[in-house]
Amino acid sequence: MTRLRPVWALIVAGMGRRIAASPEDEGPTLRQDDPQAPWPVKRGGWISRPYSRSLGAALLAIFMVTFIARLWQSTRHAAEQAAAHGQPAEGVLQHLFSGQFWFESFQNWQSEFLSTGVLVLLAICLREKGSPESKPVAAPHQKTGH
């Protein structure tokens, strides 16, 4: 399961905004007259505010759901192990603050960070013909940022 990708996307999105904010993304009010704009942008007002942050909210919600599911499953597994050894099971909150839960979580997150980081770094330097995520193969380094 990829629990870390939503967090990584928020970090990268935040960095991208600070590094290269485009004038097109200054706010939904600039595009209200555009006939192809999404309906929350056309309507404006309070509805455009959550819409302008909907990706981050969705990714955070996915992260929270997967984190809670991971906590629940890990707690169940720890309870089964404790029962097999004749020990009392710990509750969800006790397990949340246990070293075992965080060890398992950080071990998983470490592999996710590593794989995502490798993909980001390789995508900066290398090219893949026919891929929409890649830079054009023939584009000079000066035009692609590296």
Image: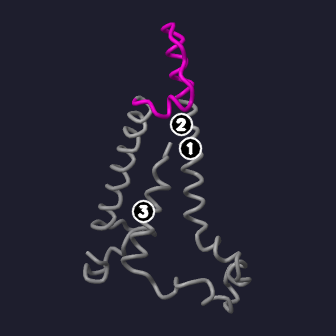
Classify mark 2: helix, strand or loop: helix
Classify mark 3: helix, strand or loop: helix
Q: Position of residue 19 (x, y in %)?
A: 36, 77
- Between 99 and 11, the one nearer to me in the picture: 99
Residue hosting label 3: 11
Residue hosting label 1: 66
Q: Amino acid at mark 2?
A: Arg
Q: Position of residue 87 (x, y in %)?
A: 50, 11
Classify mark 1: helix, strand or loop: helix
| Residue at position x 36%, y 65% in the image | 128
Q: How is the image coloured?
A: one colour
Asked if the magenta segment contains residue 64, the reply would be no
Disc 2 and disc 3: Cα gap in Å? 22 Å
Disc 3 and disc 1: Cα gap in Å? 18 Å
- Between 88 and 33, the one nearer to me in the picture: 88
Q: Residue furthest bottom?
A: 33
